[in-house]
Structure formats: C-alpha cells, structure tokens
Image (cartoon, helix red, strand yellow):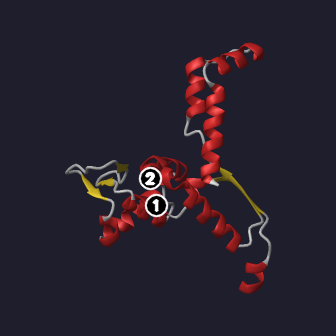
Amino acid sequence: LYALLKRMPKGGDLHTHLTGAVYAESLIQFAADSGLCLDRQSLALAQAPCTPDQAPATQALSDPELYRSVIDAWSMRDLKPGTNGHDHFFDSFSKFDLAAKPHLSQILAEVTQRAAHGNVQYVEVMVSPDHGGAAALGTKIGYDADFKAMRQKLLDAGFANAVEEVRKNLDALE
C-alpha cells in the first residue's frame, strides 16, 4: 500500500510559505554556517558577536537539549495542547529569519525536492522577493483612490527600482 500511495500523484500544495516549509534542522545548520547567535530565552537569532545572554548557533549542533529546543521553537513539532498553532507558526519566522534570508536558494531546492520526492505535482511558493520593499513604499506614499494619481505616486517614489530589485532577487533565487 505504501509503494502504491508513494507513487500516486498528490495534486498541489497551495500557498506554501517558503521559509515555513523548510525543516528547522536545515535552518539551524544555516544559522551555524552564518555565524549567528541564539538568544537563550527566546531562541531567536541575532547577529554576532554574541552577548552573555546568547549562544553561538554552532552550539546547537553539539548540545542535544538546545538543538531540540530550537527545533520546537522554530517548527510545529511537539506543539503543546492549548498552544495557538497559528501564532506559534507565524511567530517562528522572526526567530529564524536571519538564517533563512541568505539561504533562500537552498531552501527552495530543499522544499521542491521534498515535494518531488512525495510526487506532489504543483507547489505554489509564497516568497517576498522584495524583502518588504513594496510594503515600505506603500506605507511611505499612502493610498490614493485615483488610480492614475496612485500610479504616478508609485513611479515618483521609485517603484521601477523596486521592480528591478525583485527581478534581481528572483534571478538569484532561481
């Protein structure tokens, strides 16, 4: 039965958050490779040098207790009853984001390879290739109900540069 089901096409995986679909184990390795620090309380990453309240991310690779704690904080593994899974999932992004951003190409490869291995036929990946630039631009210029005026405001504020940045980032990601 397993062999039959494994080979069976699985359809599609819609609205997959790229950095939410990578395994926490991979993110720990990326954090260690990047020389990042782990806050001992929140288990969020920070840039080096580490403070006394932080541990080098490499320590998680040799400390099984820390490793398990980071995986639980950065994934849905062993979610405790009564815990809000939605909040836990979305709160985890800010904890590991420093490790994910420089490794998006590797993350995309891992996620799509795993989907292919499971015979998933289509994956719709959610990624922000502008790293929040469009949201910042929108906040800066505000909303105008006049479409023509809004378009001009966007162009005047450098929207073409934002589009070029997205192109460059997508090319690098692919």
Instruction: State the image coordinates of residue 170 (x, y, percent, origin top left).
Output: 64, 47
How far apart are the two marked residues, 1 and 2, measured between alpha carbons?
7 Å
Quadrant position of residue 12: bottom right
Does residue 146 appear anywhere in the picture? no
Above or below residue 60? Residue 171 is: above
Instruction: Judge the density around disc 1: few (<14), some (14-19), many (≥20) Cα neighbours within 10 Å.
Output: many
- For residue 96, the mark is 2
- For residue 27, the mark is 1
Q: Residue at x 46, y 60 (%)?
A: 27
Above or below residue 140? Residue 22 is: below
Q: Residue at x 57, y 57 (%)?
A: 105
Q: Earlier in the sequence, mark 1 or mark 2?
A: 1
Q: Secondary structure at mark 2?
A: helix
Nearer to me, 52 or 83: 52
Q: Amino acid at mark 2?
A: Phe
Relative to residue 56, is residue 71 drawn left or right?
right
Q: Secondary structure at mark 1?
A: helix
Pointers 1 and 2 in contact (CB under 8 A)? yes
Instruction: State the image coordinates of residue 121 (x, y, percent, origin top left).
Output: 78, 65
Does residue 162 appear anywhere in the picture? yes
Quadrant position of residue 1: bottom right
Q: Amino acid at mark 1?
A: Leu
Instruction: Judge the density around disc 2: few (<14), some (14-19), many (≥20) Cα neighbours within 10 Å.
Output: many
Instruction: State the image coordinates of residue 17 (x, y, percent, origin top left).
Output: 61, 52
Nearer to me, 92 or 104: 104
Where is the C terminus found, in terms of image quarters?
bottom right
Q: Residue at x 34, y 48 (%)?
A: 46
- For residue 3, the mark is none
